[in-house]
Image (tube, rainbow, N blue to C red):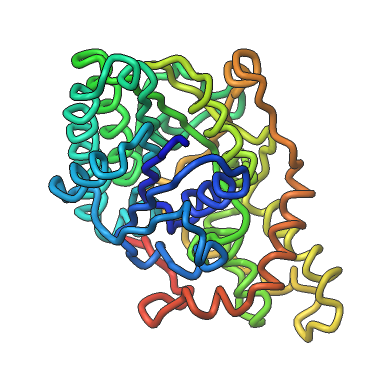
Amino acid sequence: MQTILVTGGAGFIGGNFVHRLMAQGGVQVVNLDKLTYAGNLDTLAPLGGNPGHIFVQGDIGDRDLVTRLLADYAVDAVVNFAAESHVDRSIDGPAAFIETNVLGTFNLLDCAKAYWMGLSDGRRAGFRFLHVSTDEVYGSLGPTGLFTEGTAYAPNSPYSASKAASDHLVRAWHHTYGLPVLTTNCSNNYGPYQFPEKLIPLIIQKALGGEPLPIYGDGSNIRDWLYVDDHCRAILRVLEAGRPGEVYNVGGNSERTNLQVVDTLCALLDELVPDSPHRPHVGLKTFVKDRPGHDRRYAIDSSKLQRELGWAPQETFESGLRRTLVWYLEHADWCARVTDGSYRGQRLGAA
């Protein structure tokens, strides 16, 4: 049975990835998460009692802990989701992003290298270190074109700069030491278990409460939206068959402006919550001062992943958004529990 060390596995994408791994079976998951505000054991509650899932609360920057987990569980692969990930928070407090995304990734890489070098030849050949990153490292696109794996890095926020630095470290550990690494750069994820500070769950929560729906600037910033389970399938495919040292872009082929996202959500809420006193929800829209340095457009070319590894997204934006909204409507208790007193949907990153 393969053993995978998943870091950040109580967060949004990491949690969904762990659920997918456990559902397919035949694998043991060692789940290391620091349990910051965005990492929640409620996300992992459905796995309670599953002997194949081992949760460990801890920091990827803790060298002794990471070293011990790799050795004690005879880990075959590391999948690194652990990261501070919200651009607005990086504007208000970049230090945590440097500590986790840069120094934490360095420590994880260095521990993995030492462990990998001590493996037998057969196990060393099969070991993988998969680093999950973002399209934001590429900067901002003009009105046309797509990010490819060869696009030059041009990060514009403290968050994207910290992720760019971690990507470069991963590349360097492969080219310098031979560590068999894989990197994925994804577009904007959405779906179940996403902490309600990001656009889609934030809009859902505010609309249900009849609060103003904040739209940055004129709402014309464009993102390529990727349903989280499609992303998890892509990561699994890269882990199974990706070529060490390679980068794979993962996109949803679903470019939308922020305004289009909010309008689509409002229409879905009108349909699925017909007794809401706040219908039509589109009337709650309000435009607020834009985020400093807000990148205008991101869009991913995932043709390499599709061509070489046979992956393609299964959800359209409309079908994925409907599934997402239904999940949040059915899991209001999850939202209430994970939103503690430190964050209640207030504006972050206004600088």
Residue at screen point 36% across, 24% down: 127
With 93 as the anchor, is 49 left or right in this view? right
With 16 as the anchor, is 129 left or right in this view? left
Can residue 347 be seen in this snapshot?
A: yes
Q: What x and y, as percent, mark residue 309?
A: 61, 18
With 77 as the anchor, is 240 left or right in this view? right
Can residue 292 be seen in this snapshot?
A: no
Q: What x and y, as percent, mark residue 265?
A: 73, 61
Front residue (pair 300, 144)? 300
Q: Would you place residue 275 above or below residue 69 in this image?
A: below
Q: What x and y, as percent, mark residue 260?
A: 71, 51
Among all residues in the image, which is located at the extreme left?
A: 64
Q: Would you place residue 68 above or below residue 121 in this image?
A: below
Residue at screen point 53% across, 80% down: 336
Residue at screen point 31% across, 43% down: 73
Residue at screen point 40% across, 62% down: 39
Count the marks. 0
